[in-house]
Image (cartoon, rainbow, N blue to C red):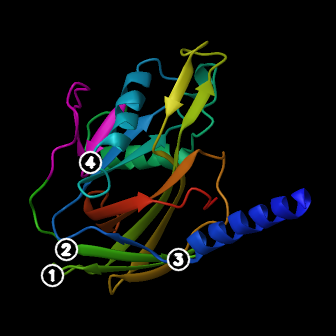
Amino acid sequence: MKIQHKLIILLLIFSANNIALSQDIEFKSGSKQVALVELYTSQGCSSCPPADEWLGELKNEPGLWSEFVPIAFHVDYWDYLGWKDSFSKAEYSNRQRLHRKQGNVKVVYTPGFFLNGNEWKQRFGRSTPTVSNQSVGNIHATLSANTLKVNFDSKKATHTTTLNVGVLGFGYQTPIQSGENSNRILEEDFVLLSHSKHKSSNQSWEVTLPDSVSPKAERYGLAIWINEGENLRPLQTTGGWLPKDYY
């Protein structure tokens, strides 16, 4: 009987997880501009941990997802200092360099913040990013299993809009064994694990999320933002939590 009870409990848990994953998840920005907060950081940068910690604190703020969406882009250009950042990608370094080419910042550095595509000299004593009252249009996205359908309702005429979709990981504790942060344990949230871009001429998209991301996180979130062509300054942003067992 005890074995049967355990099997029943396991089946109920499995069924509950499947029901949760089968339900559609909606993400809506509203018409006012939601701030995209980009942090360019590295596990090999001794001045980055305070910035990472400040970014992590935003997950407890009431304006998360509805007023601002933070993302940590881990760059690879400090990997030579004795520690290879486990989250770093050349793509993220190149994105920061493109910010410089587009005139959004004069010098590439870490920790480097951007607020809606503009260089942001963040003071960590300030609790939350500045909220915009500008009306820019609404992102409405629906996630069904791993299919994401997105529409951007905006009166601003654009020739080509680019949808960005990022899977974020939370709750990492990374022990650093060498380099500038040697013997430290870094707490990292909003880590960009996957980033894809999709162009459209009608401000409508249907894309597929990756089947898996790594390394495994305690929790996952989804960041969705739209820009015009290759211009890194976002038109609108939204995001939200994914089910705990999504990956």
Q: Position of residue 143 (x, y in %)?
A: 48, 75
Q: Which residue is located at x 27 percent, y 81 percent?
A: 159
List the residue tagged with mark 3: 23
Q: Residues within 10 Å of mark 4 (few under 14, many from 20)?
A: few
What is the quadrant of the N terminus in the image? bottom right
Q: Earlier in the sequence, mark 1 or mark 2?
A: 2
**Label placed on residue 137:** 2
Q: Nearer the viewer, mark 1 or mark 2?
A: 2
| Amino acid beneath label 3 | Gln
178 shown above or below 160: above
Magenta residues (range) = 110-131
Question: In the picture provided, is 111 more to the left or to the right than 174?
Answer: left
Coordinates of residue 36 in the picture (x, y in percent): 29, 52
Mark toward the viewer: 1 or 3: 3
Q: Of all residues shown, which one is farthest toward the left? A: 133
Q: Image quadrant of residue 20?
A: bottom right
- Which type of secondary structure does the marked residue at label 4 adopt? loop
Contact, mark 1 vs mark 3 (Cβ under 8 Å): no
Residue 102 falls left or right of residue 24: left
- Which label is found at residue 155? 1
What is the x, y in percent for residue 41?
A: 44, 33
Are circles 2 and 4 on residues that touch, CB within 8 Å?
A: no
Q: CA distance from mark 3 to mark 2?
A: 26 Å
Q: As drawn, which residue projects farthest toward the front? A: 1
Q: Are marks 1 and 2 in contact (CB under 8 Å)?
A: yes
Residue 103 in sight in this render: no
Q: Give the left or right position of residue 109, taking residue 91 as reference.
A: left
